[in-house]
Amino acid sequence: MAVGEHMAGKKTDIAPLAAAGAGQGVVLWAAQAPLGDALHAALQEQYPVTWHRALPAAPPSVGVVLLLARPPAGVLCAALNEGLELSAALAAAQEEAAAVLALKRQNRRRILLLDAAAARAAPSALLVYCGLPASEAAQASLQKAAGAAPDAVLLALARARLQAEPGLNRLEGEFAASAAALLPDADPDAALEAFLSGQAGAEERALLQAQQRSMYEQLETLYREKLQLERQLEQARGRFGSLQVEAEVLKGRLQAKAEVLAAAGARIAGLEQAAGAQAENVTRLKTQMQQLRNSRSFRLMAPMRRARRALRGKR
C-alpha cells in the first residue's frame, strides 16, 4: 500500500498530506517547538521530513509545507500568559498570523495549514490527516507536546478583544478559513456570528451583540478579580512563611534564654545553700565563744591574761 493510504472496503483514501505530495518531502514548521519535535518524530517514519525551527520564507520547489500554527486568539493568550502588555501581545498575535497566512497564500495546494490545538483536542484526526497510524501512544505524545489548553476565560476575552481590532479580526477569519477542519465545531462565538449574519432585523442583531459585549465585560471583570485574589493569596502565603521563620527564630532565642536562666537559678540556689551553711557555722562559733567566756575557768584565768598582756606591753 502506498504511503499515506488507508483501505476502507474496496475504496482507497489517500491522506491529505500524502495527496499534496508529501512523498517528495515534507517541510515542517510548528509554533510550539515540543509539538514540532513530536510530529517530526512521527512523520519521519513515513516521509522525508525537514523540521524548520523558523518559519520558511518560501515553499520548496517540490514536496509539502506543513504549518502547525496557532490562531491569533491562541497567540494572544500565550503572549499574555508570558507577561506581555496588551499592546505588545496584540502586535505579536498580528505578526505571527500575518506571516503564516502570507506563506499559505504562496501555494494553497502544497502549503497545508493546521490549527495546533488539534494536537490536543483531536490528535487522532491530525494523525489520520498526515496518513499516520492513530495509535494511543502517538496520540498521547501529541497531546503531551501540545501542553495545557488556554484558560477558558482568558480565551473568551482574547476573542472578544480581537473583534475590536479590524486587522486581527480579519486575520482570525482568514486563519479559520485556511486551516484544515480537524477540530470539532464547538465555538459559540462562531455559531453566534453565523446566527447574526442570517438575521434580517438589525435591531435584534444589535441587541445580541450588546448582550455579548456585556457578557465579555463581566467575564473580564471576573478574570481580573480572580487574578487579584490569586496575587493576594500568594502575598498572604509569603507573609505567613515570613512569620513562621520569625516565630522559629524567637522560639530559639527564648529557649536559649530559658536555658541561661535555668543555669543562673541553679547557681543562685547553690550560693544560697553555701551562704546558709556559712551562717550556721558563724552562729555555732559565736555560741561556742559565748559559752567559753561564760565558763568558770575563763573567768579565773582573766588575771593571768591581763598580766600576760602587761608583760608584752599591751593593756
Image (tube, helix red, strand yellow):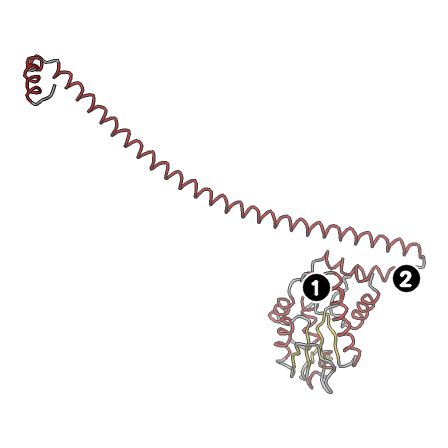
- Circle 2: element type: loop
- The quarter of the picture where the C terminus appears is top left
Label 1 neighbour load within 10 Å: few <14, some 14-19, many 20+? some
Image spot of residue 242 (x, y percent): 54, 47
Residue 66 in which image quadrant = bottom right
- Circle 1: element type: helix
- The quarter of the picture where the N terminus appears is bottom right
Image spot of residue 115 (x, y percent): 73, 70
Residue 84 in which image quadrant = bottom right
Mark 2 residue type: Gly
Asked whether residue 198 appears in the rendered view, the answer is yes
Q: Relative to the observer, which residue lies in front, 312 or 59? A: 312
Asked whether residue 10 appears in the rendered view, the answer is no
Label 2 neighbour load within 10 Å: few <14, some 14-19, many 20+? few
Camera-side mark, 2 or 1: 1
Image spot of residue 207 (x, y percent): 89, 53
Q: Could you tell whether 51 is left or right of 186 in the image?
A: left
Q: Could you tell whether 30 is left or right of 179 in the image?
A: left
Residue 168 in which image quadrant = bottom right
Image spot of residue 214 (x, y percent): 82, 51
> In the image, what residue occupies the spot 66% across and 70% down?
32
Mark 1 residue type: Ala
Q: Could you tell whether 258 is left or right of 216 in the image?
A: left
Q: Disc 1 designates what residue?
A: 79
Q: Disc 2 designates what residue?
A: 198
